[in-house]
Amino acid sequence: MAGIDYQLKLALGPVLYYWPKEKLLDFYERISATAVDIIYLGETVCSKRHALNTSDWLDLAERMRAAGKEVVLSTMALLEAESELKTLRRLCENGRFTVEANDMSAVRLLSEQKVPFVLGTGINVYSDRTLRFLAGLGAKRWMMPVELSRQTLAAIQAKRPANVETEVFVYGRLPLAYSARCFTARHHNLPKDDCQYRCLDYPEGLALSTREGQAFLALNGIQTQSAQTCNLLAELAELRELKVDILRISPQPDGTETVVAVFAACLGGEVDPVEEAAQLNAALPFGACDGYWRGQPGMRVISQAIT
């Protein structure tokens, strides 16, 4: 694995929710002044969310790069129409910014162009063999699937191809699955093709509870997320030991800048990660989770440090 810089970097993943244009632009204006090194931009969930069009995303990418950030353009995870393929081709052929592939059609287009790309949460890499294959197609960075454990990561890291970076989802509601059905529209007894953009009413998804009243999942259009917020800040020492390169924070409508600042302070050795993780968790509406990281059910909190 020679040639890999193990200096941990902070990344901000793409916004997974449907926010109005003004909210998105204001959010990124604030984020540009934070300590994140990498910013992922673009719509990854639903093409009907068009607060920003492709040209708008590219213009925003230029502004974020001017602010000193590495910019990556994220593609959709589930494509169903020719119009979505047209957008995908434009992103893959942008010629200015690295692209995060979230389905195999993006991998194919980027591989054919022979440009390096990032493997996003929509690409399942469960073994070092898969990672080596995709690295051969041009992948320069992979995102560990959120359901994998630290033990599986250690096994993949031991045989990781040279010059391929590893990114781990460390904070935010976990993106678990996608479906052709829009769950938010279904909740309102609306057809998917006439959803009336109801996702705008849920800037952090629609919480789904069990019969016993326990928050279980969050519905986000065609995407299913965890209701609990994954927080691996207390595992910072393990992440370093495993030679992870990039820590991804997933945007939320409120408090994202604070989360970035806390992670940056912990990376700089200014504060204690365990103590800061506990403080972040205390403010979460449905609590934290780290079960997947420890090889347990994902919604559980295993680490005593963050219970």
Image: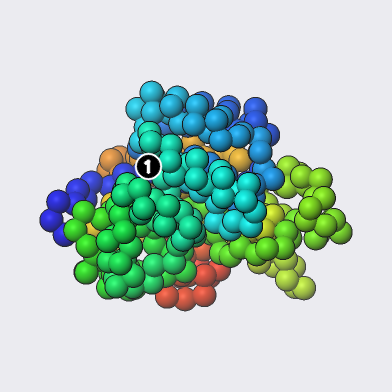
Residue occupying the point 73% across, 59% down? 182
Percent x, y of residue 248: 42, 49
Q: Residues within 10 Å of mark 1 (few under 14, many from 20)?
A: many
Residue occupying the point 67% across, 58% down? 222
Q: Quadrant of residue 157?
A: bottom left
User: In the visual, does 122 lie left or right of 84?
Assistant: left
User: In the visual, does 90 lie left or right of 83?
Assistant: left
Residue occupying the point 38% across, 28% down? 65
Between 96 and 223, which is closer to the camera in this rendering? 96
In terms of secondary structure, where does tag 1 sit? strand
Q: Quadrant of residue 261?
A: top left
Residue that carries the numbered disc 1 in the rendered image: 98
The amino acid on which the numbered mark 1 sits, given as a three-letter code, is Thr
Percent x, y of residue 31: 47, 32
Residue occupying the point 31% across, 59% down? 137
Task: Answer yes or no: is residue 25 visible.
Answer: yes
Q: Residue furthest right?
A: 189
Q: Which color scheme did the rendering employ for the protein? A: rainbow
Percent x, y of residue 256: 52, 40
Between 198 and 46, which is closer to the camera in this rendering? 46
Measured along the vertical axis of the image, is residue 92 above or below residue 290? above
Percent x, y of residue 15: 56, 44
Measured along the vertical axis of the image, is residue 67 above or below residue 38? above
